Image (cartoon, rainbow, N blue to C red):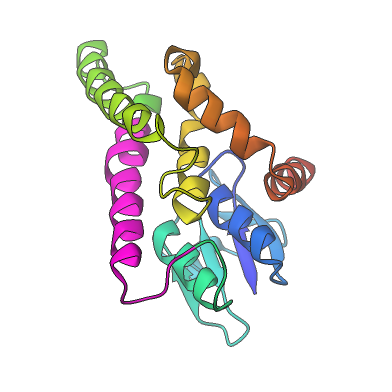
Amino acid sequence: MKLYFAPQTCSLSPHIVLRELNLPFELIRVDNKTKRTANGVDFLTINPKGYVAALMLDNGNVLTEGPAIVQYLADLVPGNALAPANGTWERARLQEWLNFISSEIHSGSAPLFNADIALGTKAILREKLFKRLDYLSRSLEPQDYLMGSFGLADCYLFTVLGWLPSLHIEIEDWPILASFMARIRARPSVGVAMAAEAAAS
């Protein structure tokens, strides 16, 4: 398999999952500006949407969208601890978390990087994001991980919360989230993934 990634993007989530599952893969960097891969391929021929992550299987099929990729990867290793079995109530809960992170935290953060958005609009978006962070903090108060034990949703949440310093948002304002970030960062798979991405940058 090949994972197409760009530094400091949501592709870190499936990268961590690949490391957690010990699945063999090739890591290929994408330049978000030029849309070229490190080996000179036009990334738009791989993912016409133009953004990472993209997972290319050995048969040439390509899967995009982080929540879909991480669930596909987890299902390659039956019985792993990262995702409940398909068709269970717990799997539906996982999908609920992945969708919440995607629509409310990931999509809620992304516009704040846009320098063309008016400050007043950004203030409204930040306030909405802060409410979502409050909800996450309450959810994590009684437990270390979103679903009780470490899993796919935690990989995704760690990835998107990692963008907050770039947005001048202090994660320490939510001590429970700061502790969550430290807990995930301490995992060997996370350290290896982040080091590999830094080395490829």
Q: Quadrant of the N terminus?
A: bottom right
Measuring from the top left, give residue 80's x and y in whole percent.
Answer: 57, 69
The one nearer the camera, 51 or 87, is 87
Q: Quadrant of residue 195?
A: top right
- 25 left or right of 156 in image: right
Region in magenta: 83-110
Q: Position of residue 106 (x, y in %)?
A: 37, 40
Position of the C terminus, as image quadrant, is top right
Determine the residue positioned at 24% across, 14% down.
123
Q: Nearer the viewer, residue 5 or 30?
A: 5
Residue in view at x 24 percent, y 16 percent = 118
| Residue 166 seen in render | no
Q: Is residue 46 magenta?
A: no
Tell me where residue 188 appears, x and y as whole percent: 74, 46
Does residue 57 appear anywhere in the picture? yes
Name the residue: 62% across, 56% down: 15
Looking at this rendering, what residue extends furthest in the right direction? 199
Q: Is residue 168 left or right of residue 129?
A: right
Which residue is found at the position 47% from the left and 64% from the top?
83
Q: Along the horizontal axis of the image, is 126 left or right of 43?
A: left
Q: Position of residue 198 (x, y in %)?
A: 74, 40
Q: Going by the picture, which residue comes out furthest to the front?
A: 142
Residue 142 sits above or below residue 147 on the image: above
Q: How many marks?
A: 0
Dominant secondary structure of the magenta stretch? Answer: helix
- Residue 76 vertical placement versus 174 (above, below): below
Q: Quadrant of residue 181?
A: top right
